[in-house]
Amino acid sequence: MPEVEDSYLGPIKTAVVAATGTGIPAVLVPALDAGGIGPIWATMISGIAARAGREICAPDIAGLVTTAVGAVSGYVRGSKILSWLAAPLVIAFPVAGVPPTVAVGAMLNGIFTLRLGRACARRFTDPGFTGLDMADLTAGIGGRLARLPSGEEIKTIKDMLTAHVPEN
């Protein structure tokens, strides 16, 4: 993850792993995405802010998280609709159909978390960062999150997840 200093990777990696985990049960209960991802993102943002030496108040973090969840909800809803349109395939081939559906939801959660973490780390490390910058970050976060994933982002998520797998 060359775009962010190593000191900010801890909270981002932890949040990515947690966020991908919420994508698994959310295949069956879509509301789990928003309900699970919000606290994960708030914790990540607080961790990044603390490492950057920034004191960001809870209402500002809540505003950023609410805006971010709202920004990706349409994207996620669309992917859920596509997943449910594939339900006949999942029913016909249950073993083969479920893993791709779960993988898409988990991967999207990880990518949105990675993007939010990177955006916060970049902004919070700016020496001239002010409350106005927080408002600007919140207002512009939607455009940063809701876009097609890149190959680099998918690889980064995969690397973060495999780094957390215990060895036998």
Image (cartoon, rainbow, N blue to C red):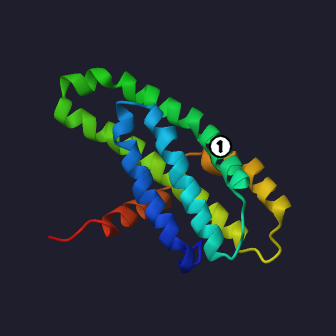
Location of mark 1 (residue): 66
User: For this view, does 35 lie left or right of residue 164?
Assistant: right
Residue 80 or residue 50, whichever sits in front: 50
Q: Is residue 1 visible from the viewing direction of this image? A: no
The C terminus, quarter of image:
bottom left
Q: Is residue 106 visible from the viewing direction of this image? A: yes
Position of 88 relative to 17 (above/below)? above
Quarter of the rendering containing residue 2:
bottom right
> In x, y percent, where is residue 90?
25, 27
User: For this view, does 30 lie left or right of residue 68?
Assistant: left
Position of 19 relative to 67 (above/below)? below
Quarter of the rendering containing residue 60:
bottom right
Under circle 1, the secondary element is helix
Q: Residue, x 68% and y 69% (percent of image)?
A: 122
> In x, y percent, where is residue 70?
63, 38
> In x, y percent, where is residue 131?
83, 62
Please name the amino acid that badge 1 sits on: Thr
> In x, y percent, where is residue 165?
27, 65
User: For this view, does 3 lie left or right of residue 156?
Assistant: right
